[in-house]
Amino acid sequence: MALRQELAEKIRRTEPYVPGEQPQDKVIKLNTNENPYPPAPGVQEALRTMDADRFRLYPDPGAHMLTKALAGRYGVGEDQVFAGVGSDDVLAMCFLTFFTSGRPVLFPDITYSFYKVWAELYRIPYICPVLDQDFRLVREDYYRENGGIIFPNPNAPTAIYEDLGFVEDILSHNRDSVVIVDEAYIDFAGPSALELINKYDNLIVVQTFSKARSMAGMRIGYAISNPDLIRCLNDIKYSFNSYTMSQAAILCGTEAVKDEAYFQEGIRKIVETREWAKGELRKLGFLFPEAKANFIFARHPKYDAGELFEALKKNNIYVRHWNDGRIGQYLRITVGTEKEMKVLFDFLREYIMK
Ligand code: PMP
């Protein structure tokens, strides 16, 4: 039965974010930038020895065990760290907390598509400066008056990394705006804007456990900034849902942070596979911007990306494709294990030869 019009009109409507598919069958899954390797062994051990009796109690609303571990790892004060349920949760809280001036928030036209969804959800005006023809951000576009700025570094889905000189230029031109640098993929790229945290009081750096720490399913993300902005974030969080992170997530996240050697080795393996994969893609005639994340954003001048996407899927190889303007001829390919990538390249070789 259809809703009465009067009732229907009172409901908030929004166009939601569309996540990549999570097929339940065994496939080569290169479509959502997950890590193909398991989390640090200490995470498995923590889960094995976890006492379910703890679940009687609410978790620590401040997730202090985790924020303390992160503060130690990144050399900041504990009052400079805010943890949440994946960086999506942290970023959504940031939009709600900081983008309130009524002036338009700036983010690139080609970027993480959730930014637009949050802006619409919270009714925040926004302007999307157009990336240049090489998919690079144009710094001057961020010199105009604004109600805040957010961009990923490396950007998604392009995988392009901008150096800290670029980030600092945006920060210094926007001393009166909050600038959020979404560093979901930074561990595969280059120096983090965390280096600038004590220099710019308008900077928030957001990172995640979903990529380099192999824990997308545990949902852990965090923001690092100065104590004032972190306090503001916490006030909004406690006005929304105080117990966001589960006991299990707090514990497992803390264990992951302890194992620095495993973390570094995991990054090394992905970067090595990525660099080899770039060579293979080039041999097959693919073109792509310099990829610094755990994915490559590639197109083939002779083959339609939509058709190739479907052909791959039929063969149980999942990559990501957006039927969307300037990026419609690109495929975003997550870097999997070498073995997974070989299956992809075997398929592509055959597809291109035939
Ligand atoms: N930012 C960017 C740029 C992303 O690509 C993603 C992954 N979809 C996220 C944030 C959110 O990741 P998570 O919520 O798993 O931390």
Image (tube, rainbow, N blue to C red):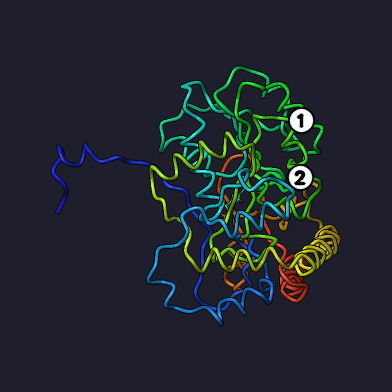
The percent coordinates of residue 191 (x first, y second) are 81, 45
Q: Look at 54% across and 24% down and name the residue there.
A: 147
Quarter of the rendering occupied by the C terminus: bottom right
For the residues labelled 2 and 1, the Cα–Cα distance comes to 11 Å
Q: Are marks 2 and 1 in contact (CB under 8 Å)?
A: no
Mark 1 residue element: helix
Q: Which residue does the numbered mark 2 point to in the structure image?
A: 192
Q: Residues within 10 Å of mark 2 (few under 14, many from 20)?
A: some
Residue 346 is labelled as: none
Q: In the rendered view, does 206 fall on the left or right side of 284?
A: left
Q: In front: 328, or 202?
A: 202
Q: In front: 152, or 213?
A: 213
Q: Which residue does the numbered mark 1 point to in the structure image?
A: 168
The percent coordinates of residue 182 (x first, y second) are 64, 43
Q: In the rendered view, does 323 fall on the left or right side of 15?
A: right
- State yes or no: Cβ of the residue under disc 2 lies below 8 Å from any atom of ligand 1: no
Looking at numbered disc 2 in the image, what kind of residue is underneath it? Ser
Q: Look at 57% across and 50% down and name the residue there.
A: 322
